[in-house]
Amino acid sequence: MSREWGFAEALVAAMVLTCCAAQDLMRQKGKMNVLFIIADDLRTSLGCYGDPIVKSPNIDQLASKSVVFKNAFAQQALCGPSRTSFLTSRRPDTTRLYDHNSYWRVHAGNYTTLPEYLKMHGYLTMSVGKIFHPGIVSNHTDDYPYSWSIPPFHPSTQKYKNAKVCRGLDGKKHANLVCPVDVEEMPERTLPDIQSTEEAIRLLKSMKSLENPFFLAVGYHKPHIPLKYPKEFLKLYPRDKIPLAPDHKIPLKLPPVAYNPWTDLRIRDDVKALNLSFPYGPIPDDFQVLIRQSYFAAVSYMDTQVGRLLNALDEQGLANNTVVVFTADHGWSLGEHGEWAKYSNFDVVTRVPLMIYAPGMTEAFPPPGQRMFPFINPFTNKVGGLPAGSMRDANVELVSLFPTLCQVLGLPRPPKCPASSFHVDLCTEGQSMAHYLHPDATIWNSELIAYSQYPRPADTPQMNSDLPSLKDIRIMGYSIRSVGYRYTEWVAYNASTFSANLSDIHAGELYFQKTDPGEDNNLYNSIEFAGVVQKLSALLKT
Ligand SMILES: *[C@@H]1O[C@H](CO)[C@@H](O)[C@H](O)[C@H]1NC(C)=O
Ligand SMILES: *[C@@H]1O[C@H](CO)[C@@H](O)[C@H](O)[C@H]1NC(C)=O
Ligand SMILES: *[C@@H]1O[C@H](CO)[C@@H](O)[C@H](O)[C@H]1NC(C)=O
Ligand SMILES: *[C@@H]1O[C@H](CO)[C@@H](O)[C@H](O)[C@H]1NC(C)=O
Ligand SMILES: *[C@@H]1O[C@H](CO)[C@@H](O)[C@H](O)[C@H]1NC(C)=O
Ligand SMILES: *[C@@H]1O[C@H](CO)[C@@H](O)[C@H](O)[C@H]1NC(C)=O
């Protein structure tokens, strides 16, 4: 395996050199800036991923000039663990963060982060909005000053996240899940993602005369719940055009340990009023439609912010020397398998959008004066006509972003981590994906495997099943996603020793992508697949 990779990478390095020698890429490489955009809880419901309903013209425009990873996966479908994992390039078993209660530098190891590494290499690094998970996870400072050159920016209105600002049918204001708002009526007459966009644009404008390259990370809060967004975005989604999830019933062979009971939805006023039974609900169909409609509207609202940001990058003349990465920390269930939110190992929550725009690599350098990212207004533009960009099918992991960016920027890649790496500050548990950025990279759409995991406190759904604290974790679900299947084993886990007992299997799942892309027909216990299960179980143990 490693020999093959060495060969492929050498070949790519050679090809990249020939392809771009004329453009003098190497000279500029050291100077490429990075705009790193992270959406919160965004599944691949985007036009560029083939979604027939969602209107995301600005992200689609970015995709049309990027290499787009169709099968990119987060290592855990929870904000804090996923972000800490991809920012340090270590898996949750190495950051030892499965909840939101520890800071890796003191709890696991003093791992170097991606922005910290770039800062060490002369980059001006800046954080706007939600990049690290806030709170204990990043020592209440977003890991400043280690990761950032200047203090991170947080939109002032994020403190109203759970405030009673959503107008209900009774005319009163509530803390609702579904929350289209009149921005003029909001505290400070704005919303967090609008503020983050303004701050990021302000920073971009000050970057023009900068000697050093910059790394600007912009973390949007939407479409994370509550689904609070300017109400005009509802117009893009007439309610009668919103279908339920195709598989909105709980599958018969779903092991109870695999199910997440979406407790964070239940605590919102509008959901509480539905008197749903715990843990299986279900949510009435008409309310399911409301959630889906507002999730899509929140995506379009976030897309508009991305559009304004990229437009500014372009206007500042930075689109020809800035690498743009767009991704999300994990996905979100919108009723699939009778589930909502994240907190599981299914494709809908582990798969994320991932696209990389690298001028001179994924797209020829724009000729002077040509606009790369003009803002697209979703209300007036006839959307949906953009070419998809270059798609890559290979299964890739967010843990690989760190070495990938290093290679794209021409910086030394962190070495591969040894088997146990708690004492190693700088190493990667991923592998560079930079070769996929080459136009001919389809030849490497090989049999890569993406790993994800999710912890549980018990075999059956509990109030803390979605987000168990470390001390309560008794079971870990390890999941592998390969080209044809997803295979998951839920095994005993000892939280005081951080050890999984792979011989103590509590439940298993096996889904075949071709016949069952929604992962509804669990074949783990089917006699005819016993051989396959045995093989995959052995693979998982390696
Ligand atoms: C952790 O790493 C940072 C940055 O490299 C360094 O400044 C700090 O002293 C280290 N902390 C410990 C406890 O080693
Ligand atoms: C975390 O923050 C506290 C309080 O600001 C500080 O004393 C401590 O040194 C920080 N931890 C690390 C590892 O920098
Ligand atoms: C929920 O329960 C409350 C109190 O028992 C009742 O007043 C209300 O009508 C119920 N709502 C629904 C949607 O069943
Ligand atoms: C990028 O565009 C700006 C403005 O058009 C121009 O001054 C600069 O030389 C260009 N840089 C590259 C690397 O093409
Ligand atoms: C976890 O490991 C510790 C140390 O070996 C042991 O004392 C404890 O009983 C174990 N816990 C469980 C739940 O097996
Ligand atoms: C792991 O689980 C197996 C099967 O239940 C059990 O026999 C074994 O003692 C367990 N190992 C440890 C270290 O707990």
Image (cartoon, grey):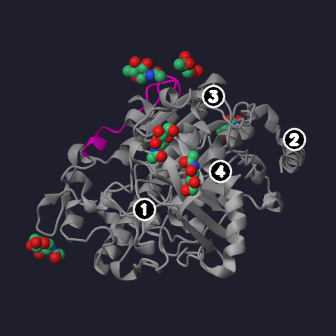
Please provide the residue range marked out in magenta.
143-160
Of callouts 3 and 2, which one flags the residue occurring earlier in the amino acid sequence?
A: 2
According to the image, label 1 marks what residue? 459
Q: Is mark 3 on a helix, strand or loop?
A: helix
According to the image, label 4 marks what residue? 356
Q: What element carries label 2?
A: helix
Q: In this view, does 145 lie above or below 283?
A: above
- Kindly identify which numbered label has been placed on residue 159: none
- Residue in front for this viewpoint, 386 or 293: 293
Q: What element carries label 1?
A: loop
- Residue in front for this viewpoint, 307 or 538: 538
Q: Is mark 4 on a helix, strand or loop?
A: strand
Of callouts 2 and 1, which one flags the residue occurring earlier in the amino acid sequence?
A: 2
Of callouts 4 and 3, which one flags the residue occurring earlier in the amino acid sequence?
A: 3
- 531 with respect to 168 (left or right): right
- Kindly identify which numbered label has been placed on residue 117: 3
Task: Please state which amino acid type lies under the numbered disc 4.
Answer: Ile
Graded by Cα atoms within 10 Å as few (under 14), some (14 to 19) or many (20 or more), the crowding at tag 2 reads few
- Residue in front for this viewpoint, 391 or 176: 176
According to the image, label 2 marks what residue? 21
Graded by Cα atoms within 10 Å as few (under 14), some (14 to 19) or many (20 or more), the crowding at tag 4 reads many
Q: Which of marks 1 and 3 is in front?
A: 1
Q: Label the magenta part by its dominant secondary structure.
A: loop
Total number of numbered discs in the rendering: 4
Whether the magenta-drawn stretch holds residue 152 is answered as yes
Of callouts 4 and 1, which one flags the residue occurring earlier in the amino acid sequence?
A: 4
Ligand 2 lies in quarter = top left
Graded by Cα atoms within 10 Å as few (under 14), some (14 to 19) or many (20 or more), the crowding at tag 3 reads many
Measure the alpha-carbon separation of dots 4 and 3.
19 Å
